[in-house]
Image (cartoon, grey):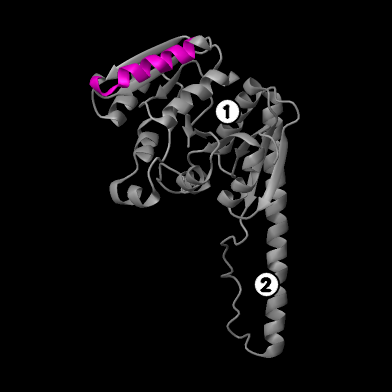
Amino acid sequence: MKPENKILACVDQSHYADHVADYAAWVASRMGLPLEFLHILDRHPERSRHNHDHSGAIGMDAQNLLLQELSAEDAAFSKQAREQGRVFLNRLRERAIAAGVEAPDVRQRHGALTDTLIEQEDAVRMFILGRRGQSAETTQRDLGRNVENVVRALHRPILTITNDFKVPERVMIAFDGSSLSRKGVELIAACPLFVGLPIHVITSGEAGKGLRKQLEWAKTTLETAGFETHTALLAGDPQQVIATQVQERNIDVLIMGAYAHSVWRSWLFGSKTNELLRSARIPTLLLR
């Protein structure tokens, strides 16, 4: 098994790729890890052949000729896609170098995004992923179609990116006392990514349920690691509380557990993760 030794940024050919690249460069620099950009080429791209009328190709010779023609079209299209991807990745590579990353790597792969990331996971410390992607250029979808599938499939932390890069100055952990949110606190305490930044740990609920004790544990853990730590236990709906606190405290990065329930339960009752991602329009570090 390969060690966790790189930051992997997943990019597609949309304007969101620049935002992903900028945050990936910041993460790689802060953590002192190599950076790789990954671009997935669709094996079965949808493209129009309406300019070619093959309705008369009914004979054996005509069928063979048609297959040769379509094969040549596929080869030419694939070559063009690879070249466009190469130029695209090299531009992002230069962008990361300008941001201070030494020798970022680039890779193109054919296949499905989720399957490819699962294959890479053992060698990755953190994934960087745009919350919206190429499909969002022409739709009003506020969450990319791949986000939930990817996050559910992986076990490494995933930083999901929204808009233009801003150097993070304040970080917030959505903390509920669960093993997953405790894992988030321990991750931040041991990771150089947010060193020097104040950490806000926000809990929503009733103090009588042991949350205050859990909150004190989080504060002590982070302060022992050298972090300036602010905590709050607030009443109200967790989604609304977190969204409000992000605004009031000018938070730049939100950390939270993700998709704690099954796909089936999310389909029946809705996903709290998706709701929070929609309401908190800042980079969000998701933990599984």
Q: Residue at x 35, y 33 (%)?
A: 279
Residue 227 visible in rendering: no
Q: Is residue 216 left or right of residue 287?
A: left
Image vertical order of residue 231 relative to residue 33, above or below: above
Question: Pointer 1: what residue?
Answer: 23
Using a 10 Å C-alpha cutoff, classify the residue at mark 2 as few (fewer than 14 neighbours), some (14 to 19) or many (20 or more): few
- Residue 142 x, y percent position in the rendering: 40, 41
Give the Cα distance between marks 2 and 1: 41 Å
**What amino acid type is highlighted by mark number 1?**
Tyr
Q: Looking at the picture, does residue 85 appear above or below residue 199?
A: below
The N terminus is located in which quarter?
top right
Q: Nearer the viewer, mark 2 or mark 1?
A: 1
Q: Which residue appears farthest toward the bottom when viewing the image?
A: 59
Q: Position of residue 171 (x, y in %)?
A: 46, 19
Q: Residue at x 46, y 16 (%)?
A: 170
Say whether disc 2 or disc 1 marks the residue closer to the N-terminus: 1
Q: Position of residue 233 (x, y in %)?
A: 30, 18
Where residue 147 sits: x, y (%)? 48, 44
Residue 19 is drawn in which quadrant? top right
Q: Which residue is denoted by mark 2 in the rendering?
A: 70
Q: Is residue 221 shown in magenta?
A: yes
Which amino acid type corresponds to the residue marked 2 in the rendered image?
Leu
- Asked if residue 40 is positioned above or below residue 171 in the image, the reply reads below
Label 1: how many Cα within 10 Å (few below 14, some 14–19, many 20+): many
Circle 1 — which element? helix
Helix, strand or loop: magenta stretch: helix
Residue range highlighted in magenta: 208-223
- Residue lying furthest right in this view? 103
For numbered disc 2, what is the local secondary structure?
Answer: helix
Q: In the image shown, does 83 or 158 lie closer to the viewer?
A: 158
Q: Residue at x 71, y 52 (%)?
A: 82
* Callout 2–callout 1 Cβ contact below 8 Å: no
